[in-house]
Image: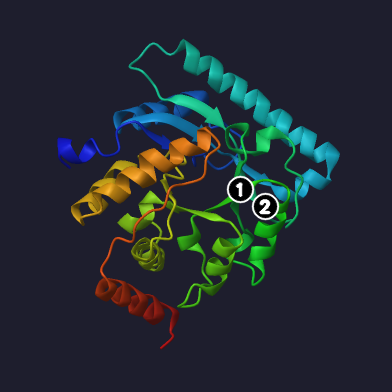
Amino acid sequence: MTGGDAALWQGFTDFHSHLFPAVDDGSQSVAQSLGALAQFAGQGAATCLTTPHFDASLTKLPAAFAARLEAFDAAWAALEAAHAAYEGPALPRIARGVELMLDDPDPDLSDARLRLAGGPFVLVEFPAMQLPPNAEWAMHNLRRQGWRPIIAHPERYRNHDARLTVLSRCRAAGAHLQVNAGSFLGQHGERARTVANVLLSLGWIDYLASDFHARGEPSTAKAAALLARRGAAAQVQRLTVENPARILSGDGPLPVAPVESVQARSWWGRALARLLGER
């Protein structure tokens, strides 16, 4: 990684991580969260918007909903206090949201704590790493309420067909796509890496984020450097810096140009078809 490459993602915003202490499968302590934020700072992050897991079905269960958000509020208060008192090198700014598991396709998201930095965007995922055949209706439901869904790590879903049909319908319904940086490095397996590259070659990715769980190191810088070496410098800047920052201002993502040539795009498509056992 060269200094010139690193300048492409300096000041990036990461909006998918699990740094609320001891509320999900991410960070288990305030100290671990601060260490993760220091790692982000070392990679050039300006803002970390952290997103613990939250089940959409809880929005229909008032007591459970209140209890879960009360636990989140306590963890967030502890992290905010430690962040403010931190005496080491400057840490990224922090903000909050959730990663919303759509176990209910029509949740009530009127509580700002469920949305990214309290704005119109909501980070969503589907159960069991499967895209439901009618996933686009959940996107329609959220759009009807005035929210802007961002589908987390679509490359990791196990039931894509070679044409990415359901994902295409979700995009047509108004969903944006956030790919995990680690997928380009093979951290989620060969299928996820192939789908990530197909999405990149199609120009379907709107955001790159870490999904960092405070173990190891964030994958952002390594993935960004890899893509820059492939001639995607402009896309790297848009995916890591420009478009994520627009979430904080409530603005939609700018278009991201396809990276590969038509020939390379066809190669990735054939690779995806082979992985899926299709012709």
* Label 1 packing within 10 angstroms: few (<14), some (14-19), many (20+): many
In the rendered image, which quarter is residue 151 located in?
bottom right
Q: Which residue in the structure is indicated by mark 1? A: 148
In the rendered view, does 7 fall on the left or right side of 68? left
The circle on residue 228 is: none
Q: In the rendered image, which quarter contains the N terminus?
A: top left
Q: Amino acid at mark 1?
A: Arg
Q: In the rendered image, which quarter contains the C terminus?
A: bottom left
Name the one closer to the observer, 38 or 143: 143
Residue 12 can be seen in this image: yes
- Residue drawn where x is 79% and y is 33% of the image: 66
Seen in the picture, residue 210 relative to 168 is either above or below; the reply is above
Seen in the picture, residue 9 relative to 264 is either above or below; the reply is above
Q: Position of residue 40 (x, y in %)?
A: 36, 32
In the rendered image, which quarter is residue 22 located in?
top right
Do the residues under discs 2 and 1 have CB atoms within 8 angstroms? yes
Q: Position of residue 157 (x, y in %)?
A: 52, 64
Q: Which residue in the structure is indicated by mark 2? A: 143
